[in-house]
Image (cartoon, rainbow, N blue to C red):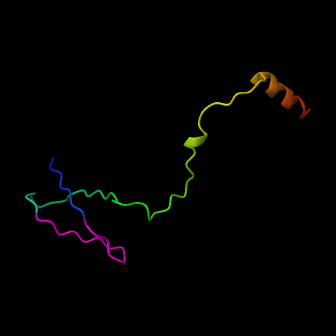
């Protein structure tokens, strides 16, 4: 398998034009596109990794859960 790496520009209309001379035989190829700079693309998901971990709780979790559920009755 041969890997060809090329940096190209996308124009104002969003078109990507690629014209690369290769030694590959004629036929179908698969192309993957990885944006070089993604800072312009806003991530619609919030980064939650800062909330990972454990909390210190002075009450036994099972006892607390039973107490809270008993309040519903």
Number of marks present in the image shown? 0
Residue 46 vs residue 28: left or right? right
Reply above or below: 37 against 50.
below
Q: Is residue 9 magenta?
A: yes
Q: Is residue 29 magenta?
A: no
Reply above or below: 40 against 34.
below
Q: Which residues are magenta?
A: 8-21
Q: Quadrant of residue 14?
A: bottom left
Which quadrant does the C terminus fall into? top right
- Residue at the image position 61 percent from the left and 40 percent from the top: 51
Give coordinates of residue 44: x percent, y percent. Answer: 54, 58
Q: Nearer the viewer, residue 69 or 63?
A: 63
Q: Quadrant of residue 12?
A: bottom left
- Residue at the image position 83 percent from the left and 25 percent from the top: 66
Residue 30 vs residue 51: left or right? left
Reply above or below: 9 against 56.
below
Give coordinates of residue 53: x percent, y percent. Answer: 60, 33
User: Among all residues in the image, which is located at the extreme bottom?
Assistant: 13
- Residue at the image position 57 percent from the left and 52 percent from the top: 46
- Residue at the image position 33 percent from the left and 59 percent from the top: 36
Give coordinates of residue 58: x percent, y percent. Answer: 77, 24
Give coordinates of residue 8: x percent, y percent. Answer: 25, 66
| Magenta stretch prevailing secondary structure | loop
Residue 52 vs residue 13: left or right? right
Q: Quadrant of residue 21?
A: bottom left
Residue 53 vs residue 59: left or right? left
Q: Nearer the viewer, residue 19 or 54?
A: 54
């Amino acid at each position: 398998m041969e890997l060809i790496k090329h940096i190209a520009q996308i124009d104002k209309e969003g078109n990507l034009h690629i014209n690369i001379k290769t030694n590959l035989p004629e036929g179908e190829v698969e192309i993957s596109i990885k944006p070089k700079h993604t800072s312009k693309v806003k991530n619609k998901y919030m980064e939650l990794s800062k909330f990972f971990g454990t909390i210190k709780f002075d009450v036994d979790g099972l006892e607390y859960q039973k107490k809270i559920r008993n309040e519903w009755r």
